[in-house]
Amino acid sequence: MQKILYIDMDGVLVHFDSAFKHFSADTLRKYKGKEDEIPGIFGCMDPMPGAVDAYQELSQLFDTYVLSTAPWENPSAWSEKLLWVQRHLGAAAYKRLILTHHKDLNRGDFLIDNRPNNGADLFAGTFVQFGKAPFADWPSVMEYLRVAGKA
């Protein structure tokens, strides 16, 4: 039986700050501190370096899902996240997107997330905190999961 892996979007698969270049200084000032509420922001983000290749490989090693949170104050975020997954992850992620504010309710073996928020820190499996040692980037995460997935 394949192990179950969840991967967060923002800050893990998706480079959140890459969208800022698409918005005026006035818009960024208006939404300072709540940038995830900018209408249209989730539709123009770039993938994190190495994320798409990592997802493709991991989807062969694990039963892999994208597990993300979308802000309630930005209804376009929900559809934009789906479109981002379709555009960048393709067939490997078909119907594999789960949007929730309670990540700990999902059962599985591994969760890769950059923050312990929205229940990530309460996840019953192994929480891999992306961006912090020893999981600073995709190469370090992949090195770990290639081994952990076989154990």
Image: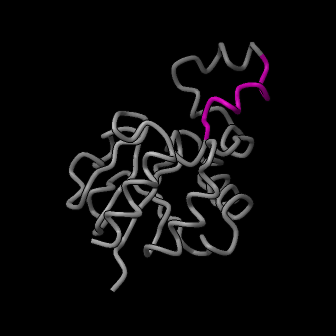
Q: Quadrant of residue 32?
A: top right
Extreme bottom residue here? 1
- Residue name at image x 53 percent, y 25 percent: 34
Figure colour scheme: one colour
- Residue name at image x 20 percent, y 60 percent: 124
Quadrant into which the C terminus falls? bottom left
Q: Is residue 23 magenta?
A: yes
- Residue name at image x 63 percent, y 58 percent: 53
Percent position of residue 60, x then y? 52, 75
Q: Quadrant of residue 54?
A: bottom right
Percent position of residue 73, x then y? 53, 39
Q: Is residue 130 magenta?
A: no
* 79 to 117, vertically: above or below: below
* 13 to 96, vertically: above or below: above
Quadrant into which the N terminus falls? bottom left
Apparent side of residue 12 relative to residue 45 in the rendered image (left or right): left
Apparent side of residue 89 relative to residue 146 in the rendered image (left or right): right
Question: Of helix, strand and loop, which mostly describes the magenta segment?
Answer: helix
Q: Nearer the viewer, residue 103 or 145?
A: 145
Q: Nearer the viewer, residue 38 or 68?
A: 68
Percent position of residue 78, x then y? 59, 54
Apparent side of residue 34 relative to residue 53 in the rendered image (left or right): left
Tell me where the magenta segment starts and ends, as one range.
15-24
Q: How many marks?
A: 0
- Residue name at image x 60 percent, y 70 percent: 93
Percent position of residue 48, x then y? 62, 42
